[in-house]
Amino acid sequence: MDDVVNTEICSKCGTCVIVCPNDLIIFEDTPKLKDECLRKGNGMCYDVCPRVSSGGYQISIRENFKEEYYYGKGNVVGQDGGVVSTFLKYLLKNNKIDGAIVVGDDCWKPISMVVQNAKDIEKCAKSKYTVSVMDALKEAGKMGIEKVAVVGLPCQINGLRKLQYFPYLAKYDGELGKDGKPVKLPKIEYLIGLFCTEKFEYDELVNVLSKYNIDIKDVEKFDIKKGKLLVFTKDKEYKIPLSEIKECSGCKVCRDFDAKLSDVSIGCAGSPEGYSTVIIRTEKGEEIKNCIQLNDGVNLDNINKMRKLKMDRFKKEMERRKEKGEKLPYYWISNYGGIGGRADGTYFMRVRALPSGYYDAEILDVISDIAKKYNGRIKLTNRGGFEIHNIEGYYVEEIISELKKHDLITGSEGPLVRASLACPGSGNCKSGIINTYEICSIIEDNFKERPAPYKFKIAISGCPNQCVRPQIHDIGIVGVKFPVVNENCNGCGRCADLCKVEAIDIRGETSYTNYNVCIGCGKCIKGCPNEGRDIEREGYLVYVGGKSGREVIEGVKIDIMTTEEIISLIDSVLKVYLKYALKPQRERLVAVMDRVGKGKFMKEVAQLMGRGA
């Protein structure tokens, strides 16, 4: 309450009300506690709040959002063509959902409702512009409804997306109530977002209407266009400047006009009169094409104008708060990867390491100049990347823009494929067998920032010296060259001198290799003065399922692979890992392999790679 509600940044989405397993939060204009919270507000309500963090980056890399723009009209009489109602009717009819969570009204006062038939959907087919809470989602759980679609405003969609991906964002499965059980909620199958510039308190709206001698009971429709609230009664249309209506304080810090985290976003901006703009963002959102005839030709300028309006208002409010010394809400920072909070209230920004940790001098100048400009400090990470520390949240977005100009991205933090760690490799280190930069670049191109159940680390060692500890990474790669003696060998013994593991014996005029001891470092091949040793086998030894940290575990060793096979292996390991992981942000790869059985796990990986059993 102190961090969000009392600082007037609460979006009044009501997600906190939905998730409290002890029903301690009620909504009376704002969320309020009706009894003492044992966690003092540090529970699921806080973790799911979209004004604490948006969770946008981790959500977006898992949903793989896109933006396809269309406009269309439904077969239901409703606001701007009844598109939302038509889509909900389709989902119910085809058993995609058991019910829908929508906002009905009592004389325009919003009421969260569970609807399970077409008739009730049509009754709700109009837009309300006052505060609503999606507490019907909780009611749907009590009713035993299993699958729902939810229609909501951008802030509500954000809170519910966080709920969908809660273990990835909060790092635990959810809060248990006093009865030892979590809150029972249906599975949210579809999130349908509505365009929104702002919302108003119901009493505020009634008071403004009264100034125009309008009784809210006589209103048949509301709409917002060109900075005005359009009010339609049976006999007349009124145009009330939005500046006369006080919006919710939390709307001033909102940056999202078109519900960017929804499966499909719907609103009138950008479409002809009587139609709705439809923005398809996910595969589930694609299903709207099955029930609505969609047309190209949306006026993107109109949509971008509304987006800019919201962003300009957000920036103005941030500047005002900064000037007045009020709390600045940095919830939006989690829209970007690699940004983390520090103990002193500032932020660090992790720049994803370039392949093999090599940087041109110009790039170092860029990072150094940014640190100087924003009074930051630079920390070198143990994976060859940079972190810029002590950054005020106010400047994070500016810095991200500056980094992007030089093809640098923030990232490599959280439950995803981290930047690959690599030694200098051949051409740089005398012991190097493989070009670590080359394979590191290929891995980055294929797996950079790919989501995973937990952090997923890859290390590449140019030789069997394993300086970067590949054997204790989720995937470890080691360059090897195994020798075979040819007729040029004269038994001079130079190879035995070079061998660090004493795998070579000299007998008469030839040398012998003990392959049970040989590690494939290739030193004997390179160092033979008589070219008496050839390469028998070369490539990459691979480890799967190692880890370090609180405990150190060596991965399962796999025989020599090619570059193509390694890419297939990593892809397959990630797929099987995702299939069996039960506790996101709690189970490293090795923990899942141990629970499933390493043999079974690797068998499934081999099958995905096309290697059979």
Image (cartoon, grey):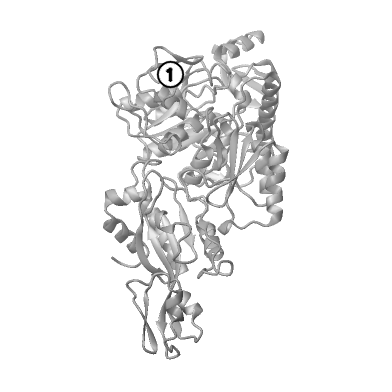
Identify whether 77 is placed above or below 350: above
Q: Position of residue 187 (x, y in %)?
A: 37, 35
From the viewer's perspective, is residue 52 above or below residue 399?
Answer: above
Looking at the rendered image, the quarter that the C terminus falls into is bottom left
> Would you say 507 lies left or right of 165 here?
left
What residue do we see at 50% from left, 29% from top? Answer: 156
Residue 466 in view in this figure: yes
Q: Quadrant of residue 239?
A: top right
At horizontal 42% and vertical 54% (from top left) the residue drawn is 473
Looking at the picture, how far across and down is residue 45, in whole percent?
44, 25
The crowding category of the residue bearing disc 1, from other C-alpha atoms within 10 Å (few below 14, some 14 to 19, many at least 20), is few
Image point (70%, 48%), residue name: 366
- The foreground one among 478 and 52 is 478
Q: Amino acid at mark 1?
A: Lys
Instruction: Count all numbered tags in the image, as a single digit.
Output: 1
Image height of 219 relative to 457, above or below: above
* Residue 600 drawn at (x, y percent): 27, 57
502 left or right of 9 in image: left
Give the x, y percent position of residue 301: 69, 40
- On the question of residue 240 being in view, the answer is no
Nearest the viewer among 551 and 180 is: 551
Residue 165 appears in which quarter of the rendering? Answer: top left
Question: In terms of depth relative to the viewer, which is nearer, 340 or 431?
Answer: 431
Snapshot quadrant of residue 211: top right
- Residue at label 1? 40
SS for dot 1: loop
